[in-house]
Amino acid sequence: METFQNLGLNKDLLDAISDLGFETPSEIQQKAIPVLLEEERDLVALAQTGTGKTAAFGFPMLQKIDINSRTTQGLILSPTRELCLQITNELKLYGKYCKGLNVVAIYGGASVTEQAKQIKKGAQIVVATPGRMKDMISRNLVDISKIQYSVLDEADEMLNMGFYEDITDILSHTPMDKSTWLFSATMPKEVATIAKKFMYEPLEITVGNKNESTSNVSHEYYVVNGRDRYLALKRLADANPDIFSVVFCRTKRDTQKIAEKLIEDGYNAGALHGDLSQNQRDLVMKSFRNNQIQMLVATDVAARGIDVDDITHVINYQLPDEIETYTHRSGRTGRAGKTGVSMVIVAKSEVRKIKSIERIIKKQFEKKEIPSGMEICEVQLMSLANKIHNTKVNHEIDKYLDSINELFEDTEKEELIKKFFSVEFTRFFNYYKNSKDLAVSDSNSSDGGRMSTGNDTRYFINVGRKDGYDWMSLKDFLKEVLELGKDDVFKVDVKDSFSFFNTEKENEEKVLAFFTDFKYNGRFVNVEVSDNKGRGGGGKRDRGRGKRKGNDRPRGEKRSRRSNDSGFQGGRRSDRSKKGRRSASDRPRRSRRK
């Protein structure tokens, strides 16, 4: 088994490693440290977040610089303030026995004057964000003309954030003969361009495959209707009572909104995004590291500085615009040898993106259903039972036991247990007892395991997705109201504001009779026979985005006009004179094709 002693590190660094409790170097450390110690060369290292990259370049740099010199010899560029401070603190811990070591962090949102003073004292290593570093170079407050080692940490993310010009400008002030070490989770074209422009025949080290997700993280996705996304988030949190998570949103606005809603609903949540002041961001991160926040809602950029080993879940409330960004998100969990879960909440239209992500990260997603309300109640109840069972008794309670025993002297053990657990269980039960099923099929239609026999009837019904139905829930509704068997309703095909379904010919009279003047939640539900025989779940979908084609129209006379008494959210209006109807002159003209 490889140890840090075998990597060629000196005694000062090994003593610090022992104090930190490190035992076995990670794969990236095993591959990078000996090479960087033995040779003066450029290096490109590709490894996932959380695999120990800071130590992989930090230990060699600390061992190779001259601590007795006050000249700046090492420059480390990182994308965010949080990551800049994190790297600085880690290097100070690694070099705690290196007497005279001065590592200075340069970042925006803090006093330029104070940072300049720290550098003047003699900073052998400067850790900086590109924007502030460029600013200080232009003011002649820092001299990097004699550095021997430069590190581009999280290079892909710096380029995603638009720092290409800043990086090229900063590196133009450094010596040509320096060693450049580039560390990145992914290898997009922009990173390759940087490597080609500023590095000489770099050695490439890859831990796992390029862009591949760490094996410690499992990947799950949940399909829901778009309007149920927030409800799904809450259920995933409730179904995991010990969750300690980062919830990713695409925009700062959504991040703040979701965090505020979670707080209003009683969750320990906080927001982390670029519109917060530095003091606010520091307070949020401090609360998160102290486990006072269980759900940190963050943008991709703000989350780059999160280095917390105990994160159990990453929840993708929204998928990122760039598929490669998913790799960074999922890397927030499953760190330091621990396991983690990356969850994705998607609408049906986004499911295809899951396949694209699978190809990039070379991992399979598991499709799961959003837990039902009763499943959550059971999980919460058993979680409470386990916590109580494992709780160490605080004997300060002994002096109150006589009063407690007197209160419950006439209560049987079983009744006492029921009362005790009902305090927590009732809260979840009352919330979820009438909750709806949030699960949605990947497809809008289903064969129901049954093919058309030619002796069946196709029906039109004026309810659809806008009314909250998918093929499964509509099929269940029809089976219930018509009192039909499990397989008597089939080929259910749900559109935006209407749907189709089939029954055997023998049930036609029963179906039409039942839905004559049938009203549900104050709304007439209209069912008529359709000439469209249905293609089933395996056929192509209509391309008209919910518009009925000619052969979809009900057979026979025109449908009677009925009032829409607003029992559903949407649904097809039988009375076309309702609000929203266009007159002939309002309709857009179509040019004729020759």
Image: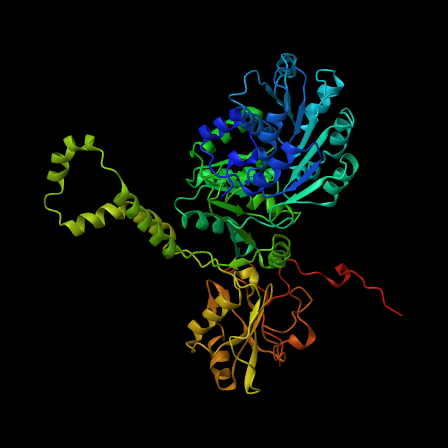
| Residue 31 location (% of width, % of height) | 60, 41
52 and 492: which one is in front? Answer: 52
Residue depicted at 10% across the width and 38% down the height: 406
- Identity of the residue drawn at 47% across and 79% down: 488
Residue 212 is left or right of residue 163, and the answer is: left
Residue closer to the observer: 264 or 31 = 31
Q: Is residue 418 above or below residue 299?
A: below
- Residue 533 location, x and y as percent? 61, 80
Q: Residue furthest right?
A: 594
Q: Eyeballing the image, is 366 above or below 210?
A: below
The answer to whether residue 527 of the structure is visible from this angle is: yes
Counting every numbered tag in the picture gives: 0
Residue 447 percent location from the top left of the image:
55, 75
Q: In the figure, is residue 133 to the left or right of 506?
A: right
Scheme of image coloration? rainbow
Q: Pick the residue in front: 462 or 170.
A: 170
The quarter of the image holding the C terminus is bottom right
From the viewer's perspective, is residue 119 above or below residue 86? above
Quadrant in the rendering for residue 294:
top left
Q: Residue at x 54, y 35 (%)?
A: 306
Residue 489 relative to residue 240: left or right: right
Q: Residue 136, position in %: x, y?
A: 71, 19
